[in-house]
Image (cartoon, grey):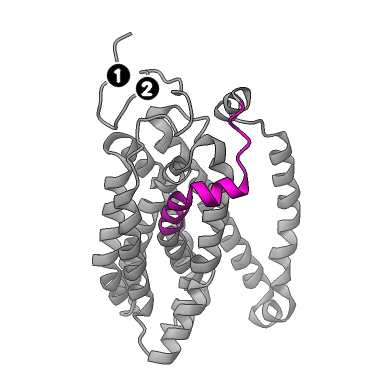
Amino acid sequence: MCEYSPDNSRGFLASFLEFGTLGGYILGSLLVFLVQFSLGDEAFTAWGWRIPFLCAAPLGLFGLYLRLKLEDSPAFVNAQKENEANGTLAEVIGDHTRQLLLCIGLTLILNIAYYTVLTYLPSYLETILNISTTEAAGLLIVVQVAMMSIIYLFGGLSDRVGRKPVLIAACLSFIVFSYPAFLLLSTTTVWGLVAGLAMLGLMTVMLAGVMPATLPAIFPTRVRYGGFAIAYNLSTSLFGGTAPLIIQYLIGETGNNFIPAFYLMGAAVIALVPIMLIPETAGRPLPGSKAQHSGTGPRTGPKQPAPAA
């Protein structure tokens, strides 16, 4: 998506990647909710939980079909023509260590936010705050739909003001507002739950709307796929997938129900370092790529006017 996108609208177009991710979360949540509601808690716990997993099998085949039909991007085809598309694993690790670390640091906050807000929060509401399963699921679905409806706005905003200002604002928001958000959740009132979830959803979508255009631009075309895949999946495995387990363990050990807020705050502080170190890429061709075609011509920064024809 990034390599196909024009330079001056890459943030907006790439944000639809996470639009699809949120759509998957919503459909998954709805499916689980409907199965649980239809079978009842006892049957769902005994065997009904397998049904959503079985429903995913046809989606996997559909995804494989799409992937097999997907053509290489113009940026990659151009790199092939110029014999600049055969990067190796040794090259990625040896020559692009800095870029790998930067991508890992940025992915850290994105995935901790995703796994905490979208994956762990339903369990937190049920087991820690004693919110009913139905109410917790309903609230999360509403928040996810709201996130999905505005995510493209932040991608488009990053095309105008730059990726870094939006990402910095998102991290600072997590540092300042994570604790107040969980404080609102702890009230267990309808308005407290709605306000707390809205704050967490807004901060998460600020990251998610900009990251798809930011992360691939860290690497040149020659090693983009390999570098991004290694950094993203390593960071997701180490920090994202483990977040719910670590948070739950720390809550159990300390008895502090605000551990998720502190975890998000710590991740945001760490992520500010790579954000400050990466170059601004809004309105610029991807590294190692020729200038992409756009209606106004290539730009060298988020606010610089197009050159005269």
Q: Report if residue 28 is visible in the image.
A: yes
Q: Report if residue 228 is visible in the image.
A: no
Of residues 279 and 55, the one drawn nearer to the viewer in this rendering: 279
> x and y percent of residue 109 in the render?
40, 61
Secondary structure type for disc 1: loop
Give whichever of discs 1 and 2 has the lower sequence position. Answer: 2
Vertical placement of 61 versus 73: above or below? below
* Quadrant of res 183: bottom left
* Quadrant of res 189: bottom left
Of residues 7 and 290, the one drawn nearer to the viewer in this rendering: 290
Q: Contact, CB < 8 Å: mark 1 with mark 2? A: yes
Q: Residue at x 35, y 47 (%)?
A: 278
> x and y percent of residue 33 in the render?
59, 67
Could you say which disc has been placed on residue 298 in the image? Answer: 2
Secondary structure type for disc 2: loop
- Number of labelled discs? 2
Q: Is residue 242 magenta?
A: no
Instruction: Find the distance from the CA under tag 1 to the CA under tag 2.
Output: 7 Å
Vertical placement of 175 versus 168: above or below? below
Q: Which residues are magenta?
A: 83-106
Residue 269 relative to residue 112: left or right? left
Residue 222 relative to residue 56: left or right? left
> x and y percent of residue 100 in the render?
48, 53
Q: Residue at x 52, y 72 (%)?
A: 242
Q: From the image, tell me which residue sits under label 1.
A: 306
Q: Magenta region's main secondary structure?
A: helix
> x and y percent of residue 78 in the render?
58, 24
Q: Residue at x 43, y 23 (%)?
A: 291
Indicate the amino acid at tag 1. Answer: Ala
